[in-house]
Image (cartoon, rainbow, N blue to C red):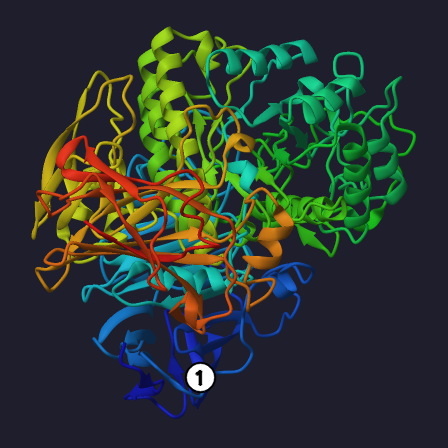
Amino acid sequence: MRQIQVFLTFIAISLLITTINAGYIEIEGLPGQGEYQSLLKFKKSIQDSLQHIDELQFVFRAESKHQADIKFDDLNNKNRFSMPKTKPFDTLYQDKDKKVESEADFKFELHETGKNGFNFQIIRSSTNEIVFSGDNEMVFSENYLKFSSKIPSNFIFGIGERNNRNFRLKNGLYTLNAIDQLHQIDEGIQGGQSVYSSHPVYLVREASGNYNVVFYKNPTPSDCIIETNKITFKSVGGIIHFKIFFGDHNPETAIRYFHEYLGGGHALPPFWAFGFHQSRWGYRNQHMIFDTIEKHKQNNIPLDTIWSDIDYMNDKQTFTVNSVDFPESFFDKLHNELKINYIPIVDCGVGAKDYNKGNLALKKGIEMDIFLRSPFTGKRYKGKVWPGDSFFPDFLHPNISEYWSFMFQDFYNKTHFNGIWVDMNEPTNFDDCMFPQNSNHECNWIDDNPYNDYKEEFIKPKFNLPFQPGNQNLQKMTLPYNLIHYGNYTHKDVHNLYGFMDTYHTFNALRSVNKVYPFIITRSSFTGSGRFTFKWTGDNDSNYDFLQISIPSILNYNIFGIPFVGADICGFLEHTQDQLCQRWIQLGALYPFARNHNNDQARPQEFYNLSPEVTKTASKNLKLRYSLLKHYFMLFVRTNHKGTIFRPVFFEFPYDGECFQDRVLNQQFLLGNELMATPVVEYDKTTTSAYFPEGSWFDLLSGYKMIESKKGKFKDVYNTLTDYVPIFLRSGKLVGMQDSKNVLKIADLNNEFNIICSLKQQNSTDQYSCTGNLLNVSNQSDEKEIHDECDQEVNAQSNCLLQVNIDLRVKDKILSFSVSSYQDALWKPLEDSKFKLKDISIRSIIMYNFPISEVSQDQLKIMKADGSVLEKGASINKYNYVYNKYIQFEKDQIVLSQISKFTIKL
């Protein structure tokens, strides 16, 4: 990318008084190197029914070569809400106080637009395209903000969370408000259809083919309106603050810059979490769970983790365990004998009554005074969740970290959980006070708690909201918007951060019980949550709409910085159907997070409880998943906490216009840069019209060449209900797969790999090659080994990534195998480094697109780098098709710690 000095262009600027946006005039402008500051005053002559803030400070700053900051703030109110001034917000977002002094490929311009004021533009210097702008419609009042910008195209992605069939956002109204709403499908037709999280982030393609990411750094409930070449944000508070991350023609570049800004990137899941998870609301006792585990084994369905919904609790009270139905011996057997991981649910609402069996969460919370208080009475606010009357923790309270860690330590002592599922943390409140927003009525308040003391400073009458996002009452299914959190933050402002703070404190609590890589699945999240948590897409319906929606949802969360995500396989609500479940199993086997979960009012949907055909589909496809688990884990390690894993096809083929068709965007995806999946997700279909971009693509399992073309093509892919999910290997790539025939859990996997290689012809017609990656670890399940030897965030010098290279010289009939390590930003042969290889075995090399029609011998000699010949050779055979070859080695013959480079004469 050509780098040009950041500079400021002024066109017809008055040195006295100018206006910027409708209603505001510029009193003083302070240009600087890579920076522009301005004092703005509201134009009193304009009728001001919205009660604009009188004076604003505007700041543009080039914070780095690829990061710009645009901010409007209240000049005279330093306490105006922007973000909580507490951990982790004070260190999470990588804002830079100093302006950049070096070159960057963007510039800031102000343009006069007549008597109504100025507008500004952020322009990419190398292409002269407007990437971002401010117009004359800005509103900045106490409880209402409005800001519009040009967008360089309508290829725009993001703005979550919502259930949208389309990955590319169409023109429409999209609400950003974390709320528990069932059955919502949101395609921008009307507002108020958002679900559990808020991610005011979008990725947009510029006309030149470059990409940028924009983060609207305002957590308050908002609307986003997308029009042709225009985007508008409307909010109920906060400030107008944008971060722009400039990438290049590879969308991944801008996304990686954005993820780096989010505290350095997303958390790494522990390896065990990639196994299959089984859950159900309705596992009422230990016997039902043991029966579920046994039947998975009997039906040859892999299972690593069992989950408990609220059934394990005493009277649905969080942090309690029903010791009659779930005795201590249950947890001992689960962990020590069955070797099954256990994840219980923890809701944030704490039951507000004492129980005969004790209510430690309530008593400790009262003692530490961490519960939110009513804005109407000053007493502890009481809503309703699963235990009935409930108090809600204030996750901004200075005592909350100690309280939360204490409760989790006590809970761990009882259950020895492996991970935690945090739910209802929007927060959801069944007693949501759906009275007119100006009413001071509090629903069903009963002052029956002896600890309910009064604190006047938490009383805050309701105030007028001139704008309601999505035309929706802000207290629907949640807390009163005028409720005060510690630090004098109104719930209106921090509502969308509640789930974020829940997971932050849960992360720290799990660290305190010695979890190296804490595993947390949340329902609610905000931009930056991926630093601490993983995600599931919430309470989906058992139908084809939600099956299809799951692909755009996971693609979006990879942009948002939470790539380990999945939808409940076969659906959570309503009765699933066999055919639907089979299609969902095929797709779900490739989700980053794969879990079957449904509610207690629906038919049991453990795969073996459905038809034999469903059981067959589950066994086959989950075995396929397990054969790829170490490859999947490698993809996460390879990102180094930044970037995407489950990806749209255009991320690898950004110049191919066909990749932007809705059918391709919504129903195909890449895993890393090696594999492409084309699942069938439509009712009663056995084929899908899939798009194969330029090059050659091979069926991963059979080696069948789907296409070879210099230009991409659509091709029908046939796939029955009991088949493996269609997944294809890209030419020139290789993956390490494992034999999963006898595998029923991750512990059954060994360190032996079958290398699947799709040979690609290089510039010389005589040479073919493929490359890919393995992890140089003895045991992926050893979190300390991963932490110490793989995680560059812990140690910048550590790197367990290996590059495997296979080269074939056709004329000489010589096949070369070598391994390289990544050091000093270069792939280096192992003989040139001090890199120590682990005992990783290569059992076979399976080559697709093999160009030699005849091989002279069945037994092949293997020559090491020093010229010596291995005593035992290798056998070679055809693999499914005549143009594919299968080279098999003797057991323990090719162990990388002993032989990492060899050649074979064919």
Furthest residue in direction bottom, as rendered = 15
Q: Is residue 287 above or below residue 106?
A: above
Measured as percent of width and height from the top left, residue 456 is found at 83, 48
Q: Is residue 542 above or below residue 129?
A: above
Residue at 26% across, 32% down: 701
Whether residue 478 is visible here, answered yes or no, is yes
- Amino acid at the residue labelled 1: Glu
Q: Quadrant of residue 307?
A: top right
Q: Quadrant of residue 682?
A: top left
Q: Is residue 703 above or below residue 759?
A: above
Measured as percent of width and height from the top left, residue 513 is found at 76, 44
Q: Is residue 486 left or right of residue 91?
A: right
Residues 426 and 732: in front is: 732
Q: Is residue 84 left or right of residue 218?
A: right
Measured as percent of width and height from the top left, residue 214 is found at 39, 61
Q: Is residue 438 above or below residue 211?
A: above
What residue is pinned by disc 1?
Answer: 35
Residues 104 and 754: in front is: 754
Furthest residue in direction right, as rendered = 450
Measured as percent of width and height from the top left, residue 554 is found at 39, 40
Residues 612 and 482: in front is: 612
Count every numbered label the image shows and give the total.
1
Q: Is residue 818 left or right of residue 493?
A: left
Residue at 34% across, 41% down: 889
Q: Quadrant of residue 137?
A: bottom left
Residues 292 and 49: in front is: 292
